[in-house]
Amino acid sequence: MASPSERTAKTVTIRDVAAAAQVSIGTASKALNGRGRMRAETRDRVLTAARRLSFRPNPLAQGLLAGRTYTVGLVTGDSFGRFSIPVMLGAEDALDAGQISVFMCDTRDDPIRERHYVERLLARRVEAIIVTGRRTEPRPGIGRLPVPVVYAMTQSTDEGDVSLVPDDEGGAALAARHLLATGRTRVGHITGPRRFQAARRRAQGLTAALAEAGLRPAGEVLFGQWSEEWGRQAADVLLHAAPDVDAVFCGSDQIARGVAETLRERGRRVPDDVALVGFDNWEPMALGCRPPLTTVDMNLGEIGRLAARHIMDAIDGRPAAGGVTVVPASLVIRESTRRTG
């Protein structure tokens, strides 16, 4: 005979609940899951027995009974996770309060690997797929699938797909208006490669916001690479072309770190002589900058949360119309733009 402690440690099953309530296992299952028609007295008896025995339903078994797996796939080409991990964390926060798990697959920007992972995820019976990456450029969709698909931090060329992207242009305008509010009027811009949509839109946002104040960027807009090295080189070019520059808006935090180094080497104090703003709010870069960097946050977590909400609505039979939704950015103000004087 089992000891009291052994009986206490035993996992309570639905069979035990059914026996205690004197009903069949099928009836107990329906009562616990709120399905089927039965007398209120019978349902109450099952629920009372479950509480008395401290019965904890098996989520996997419940999912299989309901035809669900409570899993979502996230397909990304962002190998380092710089952009996809914040999107994933935002999605996990919103996916049924942690009841749905996310499988992340790294495609390394390889269409064959992507197709392979999509097929594997479908074989695992995921309930939806989020497609993300490190660029907002339009990309071919992954096709019509038997589950909902949402694109986050990237966009599908198929207008019928739901895509969520950050507001690069609006974020740049926020940076420009903030610099103007601190009294800066000679604002330079150093950014990434011209071929990137994000670089072009950030330049457009800055230029438009300055134009509202009757101003133009100091010197030429300098397109280059998303790197600290480019920031160092371009800062020298900008200082030569516009020696009176009093602010620099950079297309990424990495570029801003490089600009900060060159300014320091040339005897320009940040923010006393030159205010500095980055883009991304990548904390290792922004907080490691001297002084800490004011920067635009793309709100990737919010993009992930919105993607999850679209998915949950689609699973519940309320799919959204296709198209691109631009998610507002925000400005994180730190020491590099402190008002002086």
Image (spheres, rainbow, N blue to C red):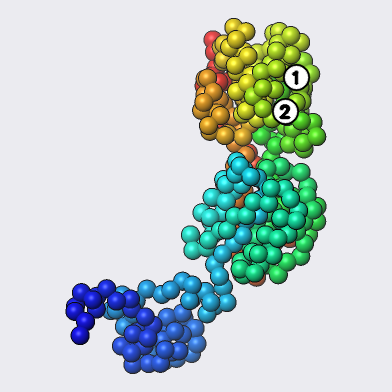
The image shows residue 303, relative to residue 122, as above or below, that is above
User: Can you tell which mark lies on residue 91?
Assistant: none
Residue 309 shows in the view: no
Cβ atoms at labels 1 and 2 below 8 Å apart:
no
- Place of residue 309 in the rendered image (x, y in percent of width and height, measured from the top left): 60, 58
Residue drawn at (79%, 31%), measured in percent from left and top?
Answer: 194
Q: How far across and down, in percent of the image, does residue 225 sit?
A: 72, 28
**Residue type at tag 2:** Gln
Residue 83's place in the image compared with 127, above or below, is: above
Left or right: 289 as drawn, with respect to 256: left
- The quarter of the picture where residue 209 lies is top right
Observer-nearest residue: 114 or 223? 114
**Mark 1 and mark 2: span between their CA atoms?**
19 Å
Residue 260 vs 20, above or below: the answer is: above
Residue nearest the viewer, comparing 234 with 34: 234
Reading the chain from its start, which is encountered first: label 1 or label 2? Answer: 1
Q: Nearer the viewer, residue 113 or 241?
A: 113
* Residue found 37% across the figure and 92% down from its top: 23
- Residue positioned 64% across, 42% down in the render: 328
**Residue tagged by mark 1?**
217
Instruction: Using a 10 Å C-alpha cutoff, classify the residue at mark 2 as few (fewer than 14 neighbours), some (14 to 19) or many (20 or more).
Output: many
Bin the neighbour count of mark 1 within 10 Å (Cα to Cα): few under 14, some 14-19, many 20 and up: many
Please give the residue where the numbered disc 2 appears in the rendered image. 225
Report x, y in % for residue 204.
77, 30
Q: Give the position of the C terminus as an image quadrant.
A: top right
Residue displayed at 67% across by 22% down = 229
Residue 171 seen from this side:
yes
